Image: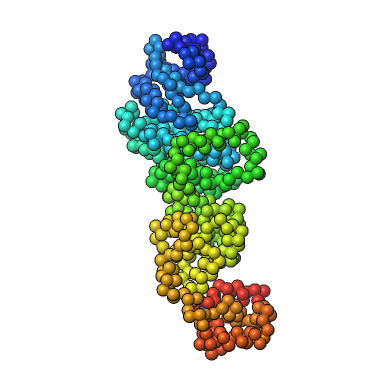
Amino acid sequence: MIGHKLRNRYQITEHLGDGSTATVYKAIDERLGREVAIKLLLPHVRESTRKRFFQEATAAAQLNHPNIMAIYDIDEDEDRHFLVIEYVEGTSLAHYIPSAPKIVVQLGSQIARALQYAHEHQIIHRDIKPANIHVNPDGQIKIMDLGLALPHDAQRVTAQGMVIGTPAYLSPEQAQGMKLDHRTDIYSLGIVLYEMATGQLPFNADDISALLLQQVRAAPPPPRLISSEIPVALENVILKALEKNPVRRFQSCAALASGLEAAIPEKTESDDDTMSKRPDWAATLQMASQARQQAAPAVLQKRTLRIILADDHTLLRTTLANLLQMHDDFVVVGEAGDGDAALQQTLSILPDVLVLDLNMPGKGGLDILPTVREQAPQVKVLVLTGRTEDAYIMRALRAGAHGYILKSSDESDLIDALKKVMQGDLVLGRGIAEKIVTGMLSPHAPEEKRLTDTEQQILLYIASGYENDEIGKALNLSLVALIEQLAQILDKLQASDRHSAALAAIREGYVLLEDVHNLSAARNS
């Protein structure tokens, strides 16, 4: 066909590639003086294939998006049917397998935003794979080949139950020949993201039936088992896109794009070397940003909140992570089982919200909370605990916690609390707010009966086994001043001696047993 002219207008200049049903050429539209691509249907194809060919034209003609290949015309010349489509310079997305996490996010979010636009126009692609996605020299993606795209009101050109698409990228519902909605594209994009991040497919088999069975039943290996450099947050986003049950996936490509963008922090100077490996990325990001603003301005107003979960109970932490991942508003970017790990992750990742348990091995939540508030003031801290003692509540709030709720709270209470702390509200869960409102917390006792901080410290040392001279030295108090303080304590607590006063302080929540144990251990070490 090179050298031929179709419809006395399209001069074919170059052969670009072949597919199973069509051949693609580069051509010059001599009427408009521009380069185009010609997709020429192969002769003797099935009638169903020919209908899908025309369906592509119908589907693509409805879309006008900078990240989706444009279709200019459909025509025929001497019984040769062809499409005139946008000519896209660049390479297949396959050339970006594998890529650094930031590249995965930058390209993946563009793909997701473009699919969101298609879905809003009731178009399902059904064949998302690297070969159908191009990246131009500026780093802008183009979704190609809408040959399997399915308008929501189109008459089916394949029998219900027929598997169609590329097996390695099929959703479970596609593999089973079930009715499809837009979430099938989310799963297929999850496969693409997995492959970009790890360099390999999550499911692979020589036998197609075995591969389809894997798509339906097998869990994908966690990406970080293949590459430990993948951030936990990005792994969580990819695995959520690959949920077998569509209800558990992201419910929109806009939510998937937001999750990707939230999974990687803002660009830093140390990223310059990675970014420079791809040409003109600054222009790419600017173009993509403009495209997103034009395509979905309402979506951009809704942020995906980045969450770190800190709790030493693995089962509870996993349950919370799964719960939050079912909501498009959240992405879990880190998990910690002790205070030291929670502090390290919080200061390095800087999430939107740290969900913090108070009792953990090593440093507890109360130990790291002041450091978090001092060194990462932009991070909101929501205490999620089983402790209802007055002292825990007051110490957490005094240390700067933005909320305090109990582990017995409902799912809706937790979701509501996370959103409210991000809005700057102080959140007190059921049972906690009532205590404060009704004045049941010990610090709300009459002023003359309330223990001062120094008096509470004295009682802590007494409960930990310290003698008066040791207490005076530790708190820089003279013996006379210490005895005067003790007299006031005994009067406030109506105690007969220093030991009964310490017991009363523990009982009423002025002194925490955890602090007693820690101080006793320090004294005996």
Q: Quadrant of residue 226?
A: top right
Q: Say which residue appears at 50% left-offset and 80% top-offset.
A: 447
The answer to whether residue 47 is left or right of residue 341 is: left
The answer to whether residue 478 is left or right of residue 132 is: right
Can the viewer see residue 464 in this picture? no
In front here: 170 or 352? 352
Residue 498 in the image: above or below residue 419: below
Q: Quadrant of residue 199?
A: top right
Can the viewer see residue 296 in this picture? yes
Q: Position of residue 91 (x, y in %)?
A: 55, 27
Q: Position of residue 308 (x, y in %)?
A: 53, 55
In front here: 232 or 198? 232
Q: Say which residue appears at 55% left-offset and 72% top-offset.
A: 514
Residue 195 in the image: above or below residue 517: above
Q: Position of residue 128 (x, y in %)?
A: 45, 33
Q: In the picture, which quadrant includes the C terminus?
A: bottom right
Q: Quadrant of residue 84?
A: top left
Q: Say which residue appears at 48% left-offset and 73% top-offset.
A: 390
Residue 417 in the image: above or below residue 164: below
Q: Position of residue 278 (x, y in %)?
A: 61, 33
